[in-house]
Amino acid sequence: MADKKKKKLTPEAQQYQSYQEKREVKRPIFKNCIKAFFVGGTICLIGQAISTFYIYYFDFTEQTAGNPTVATLIFITMFLTGFGVYDRIGQFAGAGSAVPVTGFGNAVVASAIEHRTEGFVLGVGSNMLKLAGPVIVYGVFSAFVVALIKTILIKWGGL
């Protein structure tokens, strides 16, 4: 804690603060980063394998295989979240399971499962959209801005 903030505390609070700092459990940051790296990498490896499967067996191109690959990863995540497996993966890997698209799928499905007792519309639907809505709006808005910039650069920049 900063010295200026410590000076504003009472002597008892300062003593408790120093006691708390001594008792605080140190997090293994390097170990957590390694776990996140390998789990996130494994998820990406699985995604690449799915993409290669679609290209090889269904005659997709590299560009067109992306959407079904993402949909498949989200479906697998929904399935694993429903059985509580993805939550254990998330507890082990931390950000490694939250950063890929599977983390978003897990968050949406977990909020739907959590509020299912409130009904399909007010529970499942509304609570899924509380999380998914802002992400979708931000994604659509970002795509619009990028397309607008690209159009301006092509039209007036001569690219």
Image (spheres, helix red, strand yellow):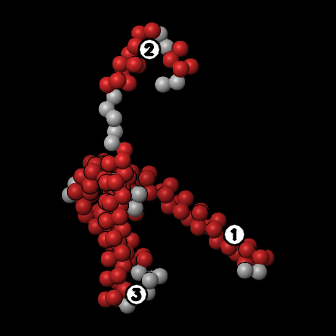
Left or right for 39, reference 140: left
Q: Nearer the viewer, mark 3 or mark 2?
A: 2
* Element at label 1: helix
Tell me if residue 133 can be seen.
Answer: yes
Identify which residue is drawn at 40% across, 87% down: 60
| Residue 4 image point, x, y percent | 56, 19
Q: Position of residue 45 (x, y in %)?
A: 33, 70
**Up-down relation of residue 18 to residue 37 (above or below):** above
Disc 3 marks a residue whose amino acid type is: Phe
How far separated are the C-alphas under marks 2 and 1?
54 Å
Asked if labels 3 and 1 touch by Cβ distance under 8 angstroms, the answer is: no
Using the image as rendered, state which of residue 83 and residue 95 is in the foreground. 95
Q: Residue furthest left?
A: 83
Q: Quadrant of residue 86?
A: bottom left
Query: Which residue sits furthest right?
Result: 156
State which quadrant residue 101 falls in: bottom left
What residue did someone put label 1 on?
149
Residue type at tag 1? Ile
Q: Position of residue 149 (x, y in %)?
A: 69, 69
Residue under label 3? 60
Disc 2 is placed on an element classified as: helix
Figure quadrant of the C terminus: bottom right
Q: Which residue is mark 2?
A: 14
